[in-house]
Amino acid sequence: MLAMINFPAWLKPEIVPGLPFRWYGLMYVVAFMVTWLLFRYESKRTKKPWTEELSANFFLWAIVGILLGGRLAGTLIYEPTDYYWRHPWMILWPFDESGAFVGYQGMSFHGGLVGLIVATLIWCKVRKEKWLEWADLIAISAPLGYTFGRLGNFINGELWGKVTAAPWGMVFPNAPSFAANQPWVQEYAAKAGIPINAMTEVVNLPRHPSQLYEALFEGLLLWLVLWFIARKRRPFAGFNVAAYIIGYGTARFFIEYFREPDPGLGYIIKLGDPDAPTYLFTTPFNYSMGQILCFMMIVAGGLLMYLFYKRSKLLQAESTQTTQGAQAGPGATKNAARKRRKQIK
């Protein structure tokens, strides 16, 4: 009896074989649609003072920021060679050098997040809108959409995890195989029920379906927490943004232990075993690029949570002083303003 799961043979990246329409791209469209519907629902529920046309314009900027940021980081940071640095025009070109359509498979979440923040900050600056009010709604809406992006990775059969003997381990056809004469390979193959004989040269071992882990924890579960808990208890502007950054960073940090690091990068920090292979979990003290960026997210999210909290308290105090000053007369209001300026200095 096999103690593993074979990747579904009928699951192909192309929606229609021979045509340049891929499930991965469709999953992006579904992700944006789901996020948009949740965003509009919450905007109406909380009676936000913006029109659907304005919302659509904001959303368009957000999508462009995600795609540009994700593509730039995916090609310039995660690409193990300097190909895109030497061929920058290929970054936004969806065809390879032979003319075959390959789409935009090199996308980085962290780059997309930075692109989203930069694009929407610029939009709010130009439109004179309060960025935190918009960002808080995006933060609680996006994780459910993100779930579909990871399902797209799974359909592509990419971003697989490390080798595992767990019964839900999956054999990905595009994952590299291992020499069958190695003892550790024979051990894992025996646990998975994969036969090895004298004629067997290489074995494709089961791996963690890390794309599904990410879809579940970074997507669905994070959305449930933010939508049903943070959304209803938002104590101050920016709370949802900080909670999303901390939540995603934490979930992704631990899932990275099960996901094989990007080829060519491997482990960036090796505090455990410096010779540890990337395809096996051997120590919790070797860290991938994804874990480093997620740790930075957790720290940044915690700092933003504190700053947004202090900002809300300051605005509350100013509002109270203004109200009291208005009741006491114009002279008191001026004195309160002078006092605030002295405190700032």
Image (cartoon, rainbow, N blue to C red):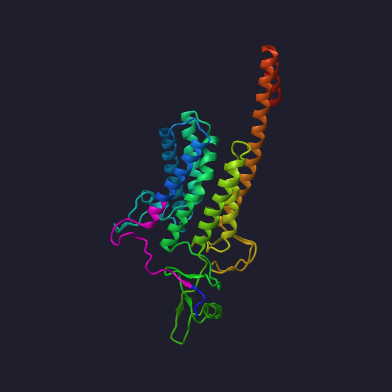
Magenta portion: prevailing SS class: loop
Q: Residue drawn at (66%, 40%), measured in percent from left and top?
A: 306
Percent coordinates x, y for residue 292 in the rendering = 59, 54
Residue 114 falls inside the magenta stretch: no
Q: Residue drawn at (42%, 42%), measured in percent from left and top?
A: 64
Q: Is residue 268 visible?
A: no
Residue 21 falls inside the magenta stretch: yes
> Relative to 26, is 276 on the left or the right?
right
Percent coordinates x, y for residue 302 in the rendering = 64, 45
Occupied quadrant, residue 341: top right
Occupied quadrant, residue 164: bottom right
Residue furthest front as drawn: 45
Percent coordinates x, y for residue 186 in the rendering = 53, 81
Magenta-highlighted residues: 5-28
Q: Is residue 187 above or below residue 45?
A: below
Q: Is residue 75 above or below residue 344?
A: below
Please name whichever residue, 244 or 65, is drawn nearer the observer in this view of the structure: 244
Q: Is residue 212 visible?
A: yes
> Relative to 92, is 118 on the left or the right?
right
Percent coordinates x, y for residue 200 in the rendering = 44, 83
Residue furthest bottom as drawn: 198
Which quadrant of the figure contains the C terminus?
A: top right
